[in-house]
């Protein structure tokens, strides 16, 4: 069954057949596919014949809404050859729940809290205290909407808009419709957060072994899985827990020990950890620092600490239940504290590292190994992992435990002459050299300004960190440019972010300041003249710290490549993602400039040195 809906370009037949072969054999495949190879359509066309013939379910996993939309658009083309039913699903949020949009408190709710909140309103079905959007679903013909989705195959946004206009809950309707879908497009966390996964599989009514997974932008998956397994607790959360306890008359959690006694002991230990172990951004804590400290401060045994935590959780459950009954978000900071301490105590020393974080004064039990969280990938029938920046493929394979996976790289079909990548030979963001040479940053700023002003093209400047961006902005680089500058900032809302990008794209010769590894550098397309010049200010190596050093040690022991795994691969991947924004089709041209002499050492960057970057950039665009 050939489901490829276009005239295939170079290597697309090979890509599709490779995916099809691996799915038929029931094994994973790991693919680095250059810009323009059509990863989405090739993976779908390769996996679907087996899925449709054998009655399996295809789950396409994405990080962003734009990636979901791209999958739906390609599935519409496939559906012109063979009718399929595909549905996108998103988590509870303001975009999928009309009630959340009208309540600022609900927007901050966790998936667990929102689930409990919704369950309470669903119990009130048919009353004026219930949810009319859910009530309306019970009175509607679900088959009617199934037929609409079969024929129109709406994007998640289109589906949400339609359901909202009909005063139906988009989230609840998504849950009801994916049961019949051949393909479900979902965010990563639907398969990798245990509780969410069980509900998701239940809605689809399919076991993991009958699922074929496609993981888009798979280079992000290991870090996402580490995050799933990591727990962090801030001083702000501790303050809120204390306020909640005081508002509830400071309940006793053990004989002679109140909730605030526990909080005061933990606060003292956090300040002690900050004083003794914090170096720059983070610090490594002794394995039993918190457990021993609580035992000493509260004069209890380790077993008693666990009992205290369980008691706090029980008090918190009562608080959350009361809030839920009153139509409030069922949140309890007391419960969260008890759960965090138990998580901290149970975190295995071999896999976890215990940290004090300085930015917001917090404790973190950081999971170094994503192997356990990747278990669904080893249970499902087959999985396709693809990205433009996955090399070294064997490293990805080993980290996730995909022992029987087949690995393949497919080059971009576009003319390599359409992209020029060059680097400066006299500057670097290497910490030691910047510290020794006071002229390094001014020299780098001169390179940056002269390159920006050499051509009037939409230009993105990718900094290795917000801090270096701020330093250069304070030095006045914006006033030295000749065009309008748009700046990516931490904490920008989606609307602010999108409006900024739209203005940049339409400017024709705008300058966009962004960060390597940020939202702009990954997963957003800039076709044609939307972006023609990318300048990378140094190499985005993570600042040395306790977390990074722990990762290096862990992978040195496990596979002997700790430095490559924790330092080199992430930095080069970020740079390749940033450069990849330039060429999105056969007609695109782009120049990438790396302001760091170290680029010469990294073959994957394919960069050549230049002693006159502005002139090289001008000549490149003149030739095209």
Image (spheres, grey):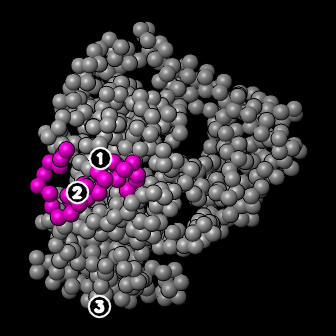
Residue at the disc numbered 3 = 611
Residue found 61% across the figure and 26% down from its top: 320
Tag 1 secondary structure:
helix
Residue 491 at x, y percent in the picture: 43, 52
Q: Nearer the viewer, mark 1 or mark 2?
A: 1
Label ID, residue 111: none
Q: Residue at x 20, y 58 (%)?
A: 13
Between 133 and 548, which is closer to the camera in this rendering?
548
User: What label does residue 47 carry, if any?
Assistant: 1
Could you tell me which residue is drawn at 53 percent across and 39 percent down?
194
**Left/right of residue 515 with respect to residue 121 in the rendered view:** left
Q: Which residues are magenta?
A: 1-29
Instruction: Determine contact: label 2, label 3, CB under 8 Å.
Output: no
Residue 560 found in image quarter = bottom right
Could you tell me residue 347's position as x and y percent? Answer: 68, 50
Q: Is residue 218 left or right of residue 502?
A: right
């Amino acid at each position: 069954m050939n489901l490829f809906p276009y005239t295939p370009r170079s290597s697309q037949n090979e890509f599709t057949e490779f995916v099809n072969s691996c799915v038929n054999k029931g094994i994973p495949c790991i693919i680095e596919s250059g810009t323009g190879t059509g990863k989405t359509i090739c993976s779908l066309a390769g996996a679907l014949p087996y899925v449709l013939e054998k009655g399996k379910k295809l789950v396409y996993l994405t990080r962003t809404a734009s990636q979901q939309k791209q999958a739906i658009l390609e599935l519409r083309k496939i559906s012109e050859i063979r009718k399929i039913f595909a549905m996108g699903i998103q988590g509870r949020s303001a975009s999928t729940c009309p009630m959340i949009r009208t309540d600022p408190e609900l927007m901050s709710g966790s998936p667990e809290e929102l689930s409990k909140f919704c369950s309470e309103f669903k119990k009130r079905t048919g009353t004026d205290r219930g949810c009319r959007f859910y009530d309306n679903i019970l009175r509607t013909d679900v088959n009617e909407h199934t037929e609409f989705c079969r024929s129109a195959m709406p994007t998640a946004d289109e589906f949400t808009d339609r359901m909202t206009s009909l005063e139906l809950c988009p989230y609840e309707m998504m849950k009801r419709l994916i049961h019949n879908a051949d393909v479900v497009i979902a965010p990563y966390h639907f398969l990798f957060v245990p509780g969410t996964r069980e509900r998701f599989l239940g809605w689809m009514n399919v076991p993991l072994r009958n699922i074929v997974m496609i993981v888009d932008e798979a280079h992000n998956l290991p870090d996402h899985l580490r995050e799933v397994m990591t727990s962090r607790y801030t001083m702000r959360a501790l303050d809120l827990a204390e306020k909640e306890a005081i508002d509830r008359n400071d309940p006793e959690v053990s004989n002679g020990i109140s909730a605030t006694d526990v909080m005061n002991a933990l606060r003292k230990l956090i300040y002690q950890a900050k004083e003794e172990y914090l170096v720059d951004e983070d610090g490594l804590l002794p394995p039993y620092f918190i457990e021993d400290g609580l035992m000493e401060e509260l004069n209890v045994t380790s077993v008693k600490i666990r009992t205290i935590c369980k008691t706090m959780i029980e008090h918190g459950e009562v608080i959350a239940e009361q809030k839920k009954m009153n139509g409030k978000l069922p949140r309890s900071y007391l419960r969260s504290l008890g759960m965090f301490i138990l998580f901290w105590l149970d975190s295995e020393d071999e896999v976890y590292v215990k940290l004090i974080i300085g930015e917001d004064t917090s404790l973190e039990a950081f999971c170094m190994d994503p192997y356990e969280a990747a278990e669904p990938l080893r249970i499902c029938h087959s999985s396709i992992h693809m990205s433009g920046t996955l090399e070294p493929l064997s490293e990805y394979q080993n980290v996730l435990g995909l022992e029987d996976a087949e690995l393949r790289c497919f080059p971009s079909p576009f003319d390599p002459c359409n992209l020029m990548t060059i680097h400066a030979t006299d500057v670097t963001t290497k910490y030691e050299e910047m510290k020794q040479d006071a002229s390094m940053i001014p020299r780098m700023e001169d390179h940056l300004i002269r390159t920006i002003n050499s051509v009037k093209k939409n230009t993105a400047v990718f900094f290795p960190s917000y801090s270096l961006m701020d330093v250069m902005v304070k030095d006045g680089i914006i006033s030295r440019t000749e065009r309008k500058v748009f700046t990516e900032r931490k904490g920008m809302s989606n609307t602010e972010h999108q409006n900024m990008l739209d203005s940049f794209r339409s400017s024709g010769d705008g300058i966009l300041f962004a960060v390597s590894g940020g939202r702009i550098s990954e997963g957003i397309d800039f076709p044609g003249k939307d972006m023609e010049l990318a300048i990378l200010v140094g190499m985005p190596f993570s600042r040395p710290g306790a977390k990074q050093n722990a990762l290096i040690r862990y992978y040195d022991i496990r596979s002997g490549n700790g430095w490559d795994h924790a330092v080199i691969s992430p930095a080069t991947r970020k740079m390749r993602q940033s450069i990849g924004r330039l060429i999105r089709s056969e007609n695109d041209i782009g120049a990438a400039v790396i302001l760091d002499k170290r680029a010469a050492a990294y073959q994957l960057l394919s960069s050549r040195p230049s002693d006159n970057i502005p002139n090289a950039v001008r000549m490149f665009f003149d030739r095209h």
